[in-house]
Image (tube, rainbow, N blue to C red):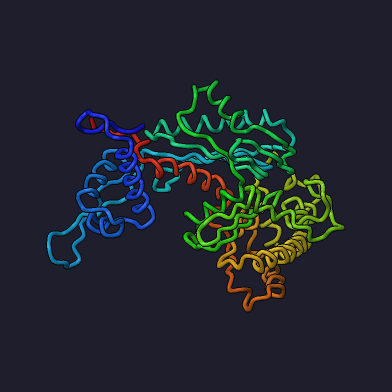
Amino acid sequence: MTASPHNGRRQPADQVTMRRNNLALVLRHLRDAGPRSRARISVETGLNRGTVSSLVAELIDRGLVRDGDVQRGGSVGRPGQTVELDGRGIGGIGVEINVDYVTALVLDLADTVVFDQRVALDVPALPPAAVLDAVTDLTVRALAECSRHGITPVGLTLAIPALVDADAGVVAFAPNLHWTKVSVVAGLVGRLTARLGPPAFPVQVDNDANLAALGEYAMGGEAGTPDLVYLTGETGVGGGVMVDGRLLRGAEGFSGEIGHMPLNPGGNLCGCGRRGCWETMVGLAALLRLAATPDDPVCDPSLDLEQRLDTIRARARARDARTLDALHLVGTALGLGASILINVFNPRVLVLGGYFANLAEFLLDPMLGEMRGRVIAPDAGACQVVASTLGFAAASRGGAHVALEAVLDDPTIAAARHMA
């Protein structure tokens, strides 16, 4: 909502819009550039000092920024007090549905994790309605934690390994979940409404790899790298591509389906119905097929995924021959596909997510060996390959980060505490 003006009279719409835009400008500047004095904000944004002081006062009143340290530094004149991002009372919710689990995570505006919970779930074995029931239960727990901490949610983003029609809130096709044309946003909103009443925040859906790439760009180990490729390693394999600091979506929003590059046309059947897709060579199912028998506990989707991967890592460290051979084959195939991505996009960093990050100590050597022999540019195009520091939370973190965009676009969403 838009705050009432101090004098109680209605302002012209263009004046209200201009102030809202200027509030957003200052808030984003503090988020991106870090603590600043009011004078420095004025210089860097082009707004006059009086306007900046008024805007900062309102952002403080809305709980979005706070006064920080006093700057001294030996400069002439009165020391200036910095202003820094606050936002402890504002939260974004990221929810992920994947093959083996569902996750919910809450971030405040300073990217502090307030709630993070993952539940093991054999999603392909369940109808979409049952999965959305489980997601609703988890979301209700996240909202209860927000309430306990005095946090107002400003948005929820649902991450799914799928082709997504984001505008319609529909999963168009999720081969590894066996979903086609599922109205996930309407389904989740309807369930939340039945439990708690209509959500007071927007709910949206996006591809998990795209959201993970945004999460890495915003808060990962290589945050701020403008040209970055993120690889998600789950049962499915997807990619999020950042070019010059912007997510590459494609003409219809369906880019990033790199797991379905046909690298072995006569190979294993993929969940998409085609043969020899890259994910049949490097996805989690491929690793498990190579490393274990079907009755091995590491193949049980009802068990926590990280615990299963811990078992595989322990076997590799114990020099189990079958496990090491499987990891070498997957790592080599990972390098094959990665070389194509590097040749096409020439990223500065390629981030390995999901199980690739979890088992990176065994995958990186064969991957880099294959990659360096296939990338045309010298020194693999100067591309650095790193394991994600966000782990399996990358997509939910990215989703929460995107949800917080609502208050960055319109800071007046956050209720004023003292303004009349």
Q: Nearer the viewer, residue 364 or 45?
A: 45
Tell me which corner region of the image, top left, top right, bottom left or bottom right, holds residue 95.
top right
**Toward which corner of the image does residue 359 lie, by quadrant?**
bottom right
Q: Residue shown at 53%/44% (left/top)?
A: 399
- Depth check, front residue: 144 or 277: 277
Residue 49 screen position, x and y as percent: 21, 53
Q: Would you place residue 249 above or below residue 329 in this image?
A: above
Q: Nearer the viewer, residue 150 or 359?
A: 150
Residue 21 at x, y percent in the picture: 35, 45
Q: Please identify the quadrant where the N terminus is shown.
A: top left
Q: Is residue 69 visible?
A: no
Please report the residue visible at 52 percent of the width from the left and 51 percent of the height from the top. Answer: 215
- Left or right, 147 with respect to 184, comes to left
Residue 17 appears in the picture as rendered: yes
Residue 227, horizontal then vertical, whole percent? 54, 63
Asked if residue 5 is positioned above or below residue 296 in the image, the reply reads: above
Q: Quadrant of the C terminus?
A: top left
Q: How many marks?
A: 0
